[in-house]
Amino acid sequence: YLGPAAAGLLTGAVVVETVFGLPGLGRYFVQGALNRDYPLVLGVVTIYAALIILFNLFADLIYGWLDPRMRDA
C-alpha cells in the first residue's frame, strides 16, 4: 500500500499547491496548462510519472526485503 499511497500524496499536491497558492511543480503544471505551454506540461507529467514509478519500485523492494516469502517468488 505504500507505493500507491505515496503516488496519491504526490499527485494530490497539485491540487493543494493550486488552491493555496504554494510554489511547486503543481502550480507550474496548472499555469502551463492554462497558458497552453505543452512542453512544460509534458515535462511535469514526465517527472511525476518517473517519481511514481520510483516510489512503487522502492515499495516493492522494501516489501521483498521485509517479507522473506517474497524472495523466492
Image: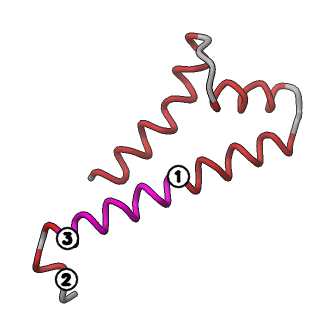
Mark 3 or 1, nearer chain start: 1
Q: Is 16 left, or right, of 3 in this rendering?
A: right
* Label 1 neighbour load within 10 Å: few <14, some 14-19, many 20+: some
Q: Amino acid at mark 1?
A: Leu
Compare marks 2 and 3 and give the one earlier in the sequence.
3
Taking the magenta stretch, the answer to whether it contains residue 56 is yes
| Magenta range | 52-65
In the figure, residue 29 lies in which quadrant?
A: top right
What's the residue at 42%, 55% (across, down)? 55
Residue type at the position of mark 3: Trp
Evaluate if marks 3 and 1 touch, with contact meaning CB atoms under 8 Å apart. Answer: no
Overall secondary structure of the magenta section: helix
Residues packed near mark 2 inside 10 Å, few (<14), some (14 to 19) or many (20 plus): few
Task: Give the alpha-carbon distance from disc 3 to disc 1, as whole Å.
Answer: 21 Å
Location of residue 35 in the rendering, given as x and y in whole percent from the top left corner: 88, 26
Which of the 4 image quadrants contains residue 65? bottom left
Q: What numbered label is drawn on residue 71?
A: 2
In three-dimensional space, the C-alpha distance between marks 2 and 3, rounded to whole angstroms, equals 8 Å
Label 1: element kind? helix
Give the camera-side residue of 41 and 25: 25
Mark 1 and mark 2 residues within 8 Å of each other at the beta carbon = no
**As displayed, is residue 9 above or below residue 22?**
below
Residue at horizontal 86 percent and vertical 42 percent from the top:
38
Q: Please tell me whether mark 2 sits on a helix, a strand or a loop.
A: loop
Residue assigned mark 1: 51
- How many numbered marks have been drawn onto this rendered protein structure? 3
Q: Please state which amino acid type lies under the numbered disc 2.
A: Arg
Place residue 22 in its image quadrant: top right
Q: Position of residue 45 (x, y in %)?
A: 67, 47
Q: Which mark is residue 65?
A: 3
The residue drawn where x is 47% and y is 59% is 54
| Left or right of residue 54, residue 19 in this image | right
